[in-house]
Amino acid sequence: MKASAVTQSFKALASKINNQAPLGPKESNRLLTALTSSFRKHLDEVHPSKPHDDGKRPAVGIASQDTDRHDMHSSAVLADKHMASLLTNPLLVKHAKPNQEVRPEVNAQKAAIEMENGANPFDLLESYHAKGRATIEVAVCVMRHFRLSIKNLSYEDQIQKVQAEQAGSRVLSWLWNSQLMHSKAYVDNNQMQDGLVWLLMFEGHEEALWQWLDSGLELPQPTKLVVKNSRTGNGGSMWKSRILYAMVMTKLGGPNREARSADAALNIYFRAVQKVHSKDAALSDRLLIASQARQALRKALTHGHLHHYYNTSPSLYDGFSASFSNQQTSFQYSTIKAAHDAWNLAALELWHPTRMQANTLYDILSQEPSDANGLSAIHERIRNASTDRERSFYMHTIVRAVTLLKTAGQYNHSAKLSQLAKSFFPGHVKQFEKTLTLAYAKAPNDGQKREEQPPLEKQEEQPQHKERLKGFGWLPPYSPAPT
């Protein structure tokens, strides 16, 4: 899509977001002419060019007349200066030039201090833009401050606050008018993108985001993005991947999290796979753009020991599970990738809303691993988890499978998988046994859905969870935390 077409597309989007969208050149000139005429008329009324002759001229002589002329001259000079300051105010300039003398982090630090002293975050952003000091770092600081200021409110009150401030609309308008949307600083800053999406969705502008995603707007390729198989042709559209991720994460939080339903998040993913990028684009292109959203959903749905979305629609859940298959993508499909997808599918089966089962995962782990079946990579990854968090995930996944097998009466499989797990975690056997004991105590033997969150584990992971969120600050504690 040509740049002019993208501009028109954004203007249409902006008109739906904010009825006070920036005026075009003609409208701006007409407005300035009207303001100038009105201001000069008001000046003539307050400071007439000739003194009013009321028949009572003072008998002070020439000195008095000189004083009147001096006063009138001073008023006119001040009026001209005032008009000049109005007409050259950066707020009336579409693109304020950034102040290159001040480092971005200094601007953000100053903005934080001003907000702590009571400045309105979004008024401050617009003020900084007028001074040429608004940067991506300042915008992130503004959104973080606002997010933290409303974090203890109810969901409904947070919605009301965001809408009252027109928070998302104002940040988006600044981002577009400053042209920073086209910068590397924007596409490389995940907090900027996540925060903007969160605000726009809370403000009620989800459809506006879809219009934005459906446009042909191309932005710089994110620095951290690595596109395999020379698929760099999609780089200009890869900014959409983070937008979709943030939309999914927003829907995984709030009332949907409390209702333990991932339906809204899954609907966003399926709509993206079906439509985003272009109607004629290959399925692999749309899957590439939706890849971050897919990962977020997989993590949320397979970490049921932290938060189980057990009220998710079974049909939507099945549709998502089916995406982990080589029939669903035209990417080059290696044996290792097939094994990883089989593992992901098996993990999803453990937490199915209505048909929980562990047989697939048992088959994967009980087979003799080899390079031929791709399972060597899976076994190696479980044995050599790079972080405590990753090892905890594998441990809880196997514990879930052992528990389900035992509940289903498959005692031999359950015992074999439990013994195999101890070989996977030789230095953490006691931790595995403790986790297994807690899982047995909470097994849903009565067929009712229960919270799968051992109290001990919650206490152990709480410091890690807080540490993990430090880098996100203003972001809601989704499940899982944003990565």
Image (cartoon, helix red, strand yellow):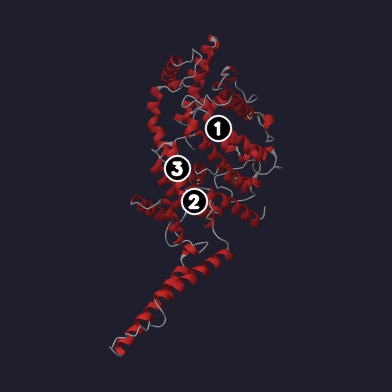
Q: Nearer the viewer, residue 28 or 248?
A: 28
Q: Secondary structure at mark 2?
A: helix
Q: Secondary structure at mark 3?
A: helix
Q: Is residue 24 left or right of residue 82?
A: right
Residue at the extreme left of the image, as rendered = 60
* Marks 2 and 3 close (CB-CB < 8 Å): no
Q: Nearer the viewer, residue 13 or 287?
A: 13
- The answer to whether residue 276 of the structure is visible from this angle is yes
Which label is found at residue 160?
A: 3
Which label is found at residue 66?
A: none
Name the amino acid type tagged 1.
Leu
Q: Nearer the viewer, residue 58 or 403?
A: 58
Residue at the extreme right of the image, as rendered = 280
Circle 3 Cα neighbour tier, 10 Å, few/some/many (<14 / 14–19 / ≥20): some
Separation of disc 2 and disc 3 at Cα?
17 Å
Pick whichever of labels 3 and 1 is earlier in the sequence.
Answer: 3
Q: Quadrant of residue 327?
A: top right
Q: Secondary structure at mark 1?
A: helix
Q: Nearer the viewer, mark 2 or mark 3?
A: 3
Which label is found at residue 297?
A: 1
Query: Does 209 appear above or below 414?
Result: below
Query: Does 123 appear above or below 431?
Result: below
Pick whichever of labels 2 and 3 is earlier in the sequence.
Answer: 3
Name the amino acid type tagged 3.
Gln
Pick whichever of labels 2 and 1 is earlier in the sequence.
Answer: 2
Q: Which residue is mark 2?
A: 171
Separation of disc 3 and disc 1 at Cα?
28 Å
Name the amino acid type tagged 2.
Val
Residue at 60% from the left image edge and 43% from the top image edge: 210
User: How many marks overall?
Assistant: 3
Q: Nearer the viewer, mark 2 or mark 1?
A: 2
- Residue 197: image x %, image y %? 52, 44
